[in-house]
Amino acid sequence: MRCENCGKEGKPGDVFCRQCGSRLEGEEAPAAEAPEVVSAAGAGQAGSPPGEEAAPAGEQAETPSGEVPQAPEGAAPAPEEAGAKAGEPAAALVPPLPPVTPPRPYPPSPAAPPKAMKTSGWAVASLVLGILSFLCLPFIAAVVAIVFGVIAKGGIKRSKEELGGSGLATAGIVLGIVNLAILLVFAAVLVPWTIINIGNTRTVTRTVATQGADSVNATLEIDSGKLHVGGGASDMFRGTFTYNIKNWEPEIDYGVRQGLGELTVRQGGDWWLPTFWFIRNDWDISFKDSVPLDLSAMLSSAGGEFDLDTLSLRTFSVDASSGDISADLSGDLPDLRRVSIDGSSGNVDLDMKGRYQTYIQLDIENSSGDVNVDLLGQWESTLGANIHTSSGDITIRVPADVGVRVRARTRSGEINAPGMKVDSEDGEGTVYVNGEFRRSVITLQIDVDVSSGDITLLLEE
């Protein structure tokens, strides 16, 4: 048959023109056989002549536009031609296989999080003790801190990274070593100084006459040791001092101006705190009972015992840094107007079972220690009292024959007031009263405040 497009005469069995590629009319194209699917490797072996490598999959030879690709010389005829010559229908060309994409590797699984380490308890204890060695426990805490630190570091090393806290242990060891080094330096200075200055025990007695004074203001300043004050002296002042530090002999100053005597008794020398040797510094002081007296005592690191029941006492004041204070004001004290006790560390015991004829202002302030106050005296006038301690218990004995009103407050503790009743309660505390309150013309007004401790109010006949 002839091609209607270019006029080329076709051969039997042709479906397309060999010259222009147009479809030939007049004959139905035989049904194409199903193409045989071969693998990429097989296609390469079947379609390539011997000695030649098959073209990579997906690549086609480039030919000029409009031209039919020609087979190279010596190559097998195209399938169409082979089929046409044999009188068989042409087989369909097998399309090239798509390029094979290599499998994408999976990302590595994330590493497991590190296991949390526990902190060694020995290491924590070592650090705490190292700090305490500088605050309140020198030497002992330092030694224990070093021992605990060494134990902690050994345990951490053997735990194979299951325990932590090596830095804490190191810090505790360093603090302990530094504390011991400071103590050694201190001892190296203190021991020779102590040997030079501590001598034989001396006892001296000093007296001071009234010298025409109508009343006396007396100030006692003792830094270390024990102080006892009483009455019954034949002179205005008599003091017996026992000490074994050479330069601790007391210094006494006295003068009279316009009928008022000014007395100051001061510990001599520089104050220091010997640690390794026993020291002694005892003061036994007495005043004349008939001389009106305003007494003030300043105690740095000394205990004070005051038996003032026989004196003509007008005011009494104590300021103590460290040490117990005991005061007996139970005598006939018609002129007593003010009592003030300020302590930092130590117990306070105040006895006021005497006879009082004027208004008295009582103030007790204590930082650490118990406070015991006995107010079972003969009250012919009123009392105003403020009693406070930061850490410790307060016990107050109050009489039943005069009016008593106590406002009590404790932030951490209990209030016990047997025999008394609650009058009111507010944010400032609980008010307790006895049966004579609002009926008696004399009232003891007391405010009690404790930060940490118990309050006990004892009503007694």
Image (tube, rainbow, N blue to C red):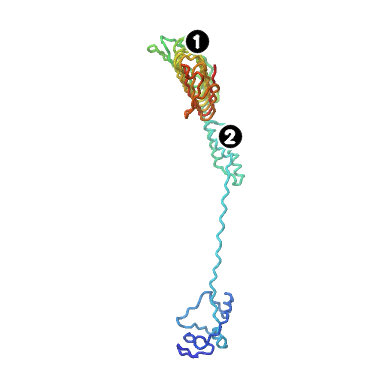
The answer to which image quadrant residue 66 occupies is bottom left
Q: CA distance from mark 2 to mark 1?
A: 53 Å
Task: Choose the circle earlier in sequence order: 2 or 1.
Answer: 2
Q: Amino acid at mark 1?
A: Gly
The answer to which image quadrant residue 337 occupies is top left
Question: In which quadrant is the C terminus drawn?
Answer: top right
Question: Between 109 and 300, which is closer to the camera in this rendering?
Answer: 109
Question: Between 161 and 361, which is closer to the camera in this rendering?
Answer: 361
Marker disc for residue 89: none
Query: Would you say residue 89 is visible in this rendering?
Result: yes
Marker disc for residue 232: 1
User: Residue at the location (55% across, 87% down)?
Assistant: 84
Q: Position of residue 34 (x, y in %)?
A: 57, 80
Element at label 2: helix
Question: Between 146 and 181, which is closer to the camera in this rendering?
Answer: 146
Question: Between 80 and 238, which is closer to the camera in this rendering?
Answer: 80
Farthest residue, direction front: 439
In the image, is residue 273 above or below residue 306? Answer: below
Q: Amino acid at mark 2?
A: Val
In the image, is residue 169 above or below residue 299? Answer: below
Marker disc for residue 144: 2
Query: Would you say residue 266 is visible in this rendering?
Result: no
Q: Position of residue 232 (x, y in %)?
A: 50, 10
Single out the mark in the foreground, 2 or 1. 1
Q: Position of residue 322 (x, y in %)?
A: 51, 24
Crowding around mark 1 (Cα neighbors within 10 Å: few <14, some 14 to 19, many 20+) is some
Farthest residue, direction left: 258
Element at label 1: loop
Q: Position of residue 340 (x, y in %)?
A: 46, 20
